[in-house]
Amino acid sequence: MVTRRINSVDLNKDSFKNLAGLLKSGELIVFPTETVYGVGCDLFNVEAVKQIYELKGRLRSNPLSAYISKTVEVYQLCSEVPDVFFALAAQFLPGPLAIVLKKSEIIDSLVTGGLDTIAIRFCDNNVVLNIIKEFGRPIAGTSANISGSEPATNHSDLTKDFDCKIAAIIEAGETKYSKESTVISIAGVKPIILRHGVITQTEIEDCLRFKI
């Protein structure tokens, strides 16, 4: 396989159709987000999901995220959507926050590392949003790096280990924040921050109007 490298300034409607076509064919692509570069595939293609784990050398107990292009897609992906989700979404999405919810049965357990939850990611980046919109359904993804190494915040940081193993890499220079997204779980009795990132605990508490 020859990996196509595409400069983001060259993207147009036909480009997004072609990238969506790659996803529909079970291929992997690397894309920019506002935090770090991601690698993704069709959320519902188990063989493609396996390729992400193999490419990264990632433990299958370490879940991937579901990348969406509109908030309403959570109803398809999640079995429970509490009101606190919409409070967080109104304040922070699209943006550098991943929100963990109870997953729907339509999501294969391989995507979620065997867990009954799924992290929802609604990025503040038009490139990945346009890809998902053209694709017509959410994608499974995670940071585009070999497991254990630093996430790429510039396309020049992407490891050469990805060459000839994925269909396309979109090069868009430095990401907006150069830091990973904050991850919060609202799947339990009370919200829990699972990873501190761009959005601070104080900002989340101010949004929710209670301490977590």
Image (cartoon, rainbow, N blue to C red):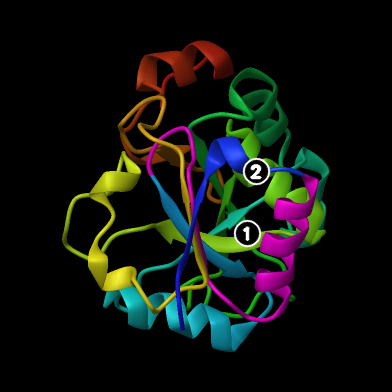
- For residue 71, above or below residue 178: below
Mark 2 residue element: loop
Mark whose residue sits in front, 2 or 1: 2
Q: Is residue 196 visible in this depiction of the protein? A: yes
Q: How far is mark 2 from mark 1, CA to CA?
A: 35 Å
- Residue 160 lies left or right of residue 134; in this view the side is left
Residue nearest the viewer, comparing 77 with 22: 22
The tag on residue 102 is 1
- The amino acid type, in three-letter code, at marker 2 is Leu
Please state the horizontal and vertical placement of residue 109, each as a whole percent of the image. Answer: 56, 80
- Quarter of the figure with residue 203: top left
Residue 15 colored magenta?
yes
- Quarter of the figure with residue 161: bottom left
* Residue at figure coordinates x 31%, y 31% from the top left: 178
Q: In the orientation shown, which residue stands out farthest toward the bottom?
A: 47
**On-image quarter of the C terminus:** top left
Please state the horizontal and vertical placement of residue 177, each as a whole percent of the image. Answer: 36, 25
Q: Which residue is mark 2?
A: 11
Please state the horizontal and vertical placement of residue 119, each as a whole percent of the image. Answer: 53, 53
Mark 1 residue element: strand
* Residue at figure coordinates x 56%, y 60% from the top left: 118
* Residue at figure coordinates x 55%, y 29% from the top left: 95
Image: magenta residue range:
13-36
